[in-house]
Structure formats: C-alpha cells, structure tokens
Amino acid sequence: MPATITHDDIADLCTGSVFLATGGGGDPYVSQILVQEALKKYGPVELTPVSAIPDDALVVAIGEVGAPTVSLEQLPTGTECLDVIDRFEAWVGRKVTHIVSFEVGGANSVIPFITSAARKIPLIDGDGMGRALPEAQMMTFAIEGVRPGPAVAVDYSGGCVYFDTQDTLLYERQVRNIAMAMGGMVFTAEHPMTAEEARRAIVPGTISFALELGRTLNANFGNARQVEAPIRALFERSDYGILKHLYTGKIVDIQRKIMGGFDVGEAVIESVGGDRGSMHLSIKNEFLVATVDDQVVASVPDLITMVDHETSSPINSERVHYGQRVTVFGIGCPPHYRSARALQVVAPRAFGFDFDFVPIEDL
C-alpha cells in the first residue's frame, strides 16, 4: 500500500532527511513551513513505490542546486518548484507523470511535495542518492546512465534557463555556473526517465525511511546516548546496514566559504574530556571525510552525520558554529554506491583526497 503523507508528517520527515543529508541538502526550516501549508491547502500526497511505476511513465527529478548557505539568506517563496515543472512540460510538450527527489537530504527531500500536491503529480518513494552529495554525476540517475537533459532551471525571481545537455559532467558545470549567476541557488527539473530507467536508477523507499527515522529521533528527543540504540536498530534493518558512534566533543573551529557554487570548509571537534585527538571534518556542502589523529574513521560515500549532543537534532553543515557540543555518527551507504562504477565518481579520490574508499564496517 502506498504511504500517505500529510502536513502532520512533514516535521518528522525533515528531521529524518537532515540526518541522512550528511550536512547537505539545504536547511529544511523554511521548506518545512512551505510544504506544511501546501499540504493543508492541496491535501495529502501518496508515495508511489518504485516497483509500482507504470510502464508509460515520464519521471522527472526536481530540487535545488547551489550552495546551501544561500538558502538561509535568499528565502524561497514556494512557487519555484511549480514554475520549473510547468516550464519543463511546456518545453518538452508532454505531461510529467511522476516526480522524484534528487536526494533524501534536507530541503530537497520535501520540496517535491509542493509540486506533487499542487499539480497532482504522484511522488515516488525514493531518490537519487539515499543521502546528499554535491554534484550531478554523483546521483544514481547519472551512474545508471540516465541523461541529465532536457532540463530547466528557475531562480527565485522567476528567471529561467533551458539545458539540452546529454553529458552529465558538462551539465554539472553548466548548472553550477548558472546557479552562481542567478543568485547562488536555482530550482531544476532534470534527468527525465522512462519507467525502466527509473526502476533501475532510483534508490527505493528512502522517503518513507526518512519519515520513520525522523519519528524515531523525535520520539527519543534528548541526549545522543539515548537515541543511539533505537536508530542503530533502525539502520540495521535497512539497506544502510551499520551505524557507528564516531566521536563526541565540542566544535572548536569552523572554516567555511562559498567556492565554485559549493559550501567548502572544515570543522574541528575537540574531545570534551581530552582523552582523544581532535576530529577533523572536511566539507563540500556535505561532510565528506572524518579523521581522528590523522586516521580516517569514515568517508564518502558512507554517511557522516552530526547531531546536537544534548537534543540529538541533526545539524546541517551551514548551521555548524563554534562551541556546539556534538556527536558524530558514521553510517553505511546504500548498495547503489558500492559498485566499481559508482565509486569512480563518489569515492574520496573523486573529491581530491589521496586515499581509497574503505567501507565503514572495515575501519
């Protein structure tokens, strides 16, 4: 049976999606409010399982592209995701039958709900990452051979750019430059898929999993130690598999700036008791690599998630600040990212690090 999502579910969904976003995906606070109001106005949204996508479907991915910090200053109105799907349909001359999220991360998890509710387009229970990652070629859509175009981007003021690019690396450069030129953040409709492509490329069940995770986190609101056992049990029953406690300490340094359309920087966490060396977290929108005493303890494509130690609330990378007391977890990635083809674009070397990926269960 498809899951029915109402406005009452959105807060839990946002909490779970921020946890899975590994620091990226955009802060969901404003999007949460917009989506809740949209579902109150237009009614609930039913999630379509990947296995139930009809053979004649046209599936399109929608979401935000740019530096997440921008979304804290340049707030969306909630109509951008409607404008982009309308322009896409007008350009290709065909109705979109299903939409899917780029990533089950932060704001990008919930933005498609506005389009689904307002335009009555079914939303697929899945996404293109099973987490958040910064670049288009890192989506499972691209890894499985889905072409990015035709694609459409709109900005907060209603400006629009059309892409007819078939090469994902070229598309990533183009859309990133356009996002920078259009204020730092754009909404896009891209990676149109047939049913066969969608069934192969979409990471299934991630939206409903994020909702279950958010409910678990909110039901166990409080110190990170008390939430660790229930969320570990939840992950062990899922495709992610493993959850590890990596570190607890205080943020003693955070360096962050926008470079090339990304939030780039590093956070340093110091053990409160002084019994361990510092943890360093490398950031490119998401937390990419965690080291302690210069030893890697987790890296992409596995997930690195930071939560407030006293509340267990997950923290986006743009919300990290000096003095926070945090706990860092490492989580296994979905099986889509363990193939040799996927690791060519999502392993540490793809981000410029000089070491190979080692699964978190082997570290």
Image (cartoon, rainbow, N blue to C red):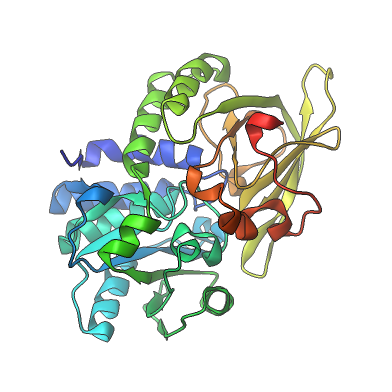
Q: Is residue 284 left or right of residue 42?
A: right
Looking at the image, residue 80 lies above or below residue 8: below
Q: Nearer the viewer, residue 128 or 158?
A: 128
Q: Nearer the viewer, residue 207 or 31?
A: 207
Q: Nearer the viewer, residue 136 or 262?
A: 136
**Residue at the spot x=70%, y=40% of the render?**
358
**Residue at the spot x=28%, y=68% of the render?**
194
Q: Nearer the viewer, residue 177 or 104?
A: 104
Residue 350, horizontal then vertical, whole percent: 69, 60
Quarter of the rendering containing residue 120:
bottom left
Q: Quadrant of the N terminus?
A: top left
Residue 222, horizontal then vertical, whole percent: 50, 18
Q: Is residue 189 left or right of residue 275?
A: left
Res. 105 in view: yes
Quarter of the rendering containing residue 192:
bottom left
Looking at the image, residue 128 lies above or below residue 155: above
**Residue at the spot x=63%, y=63% of the render?**
262
How many marks the image carries: the answer is: 0
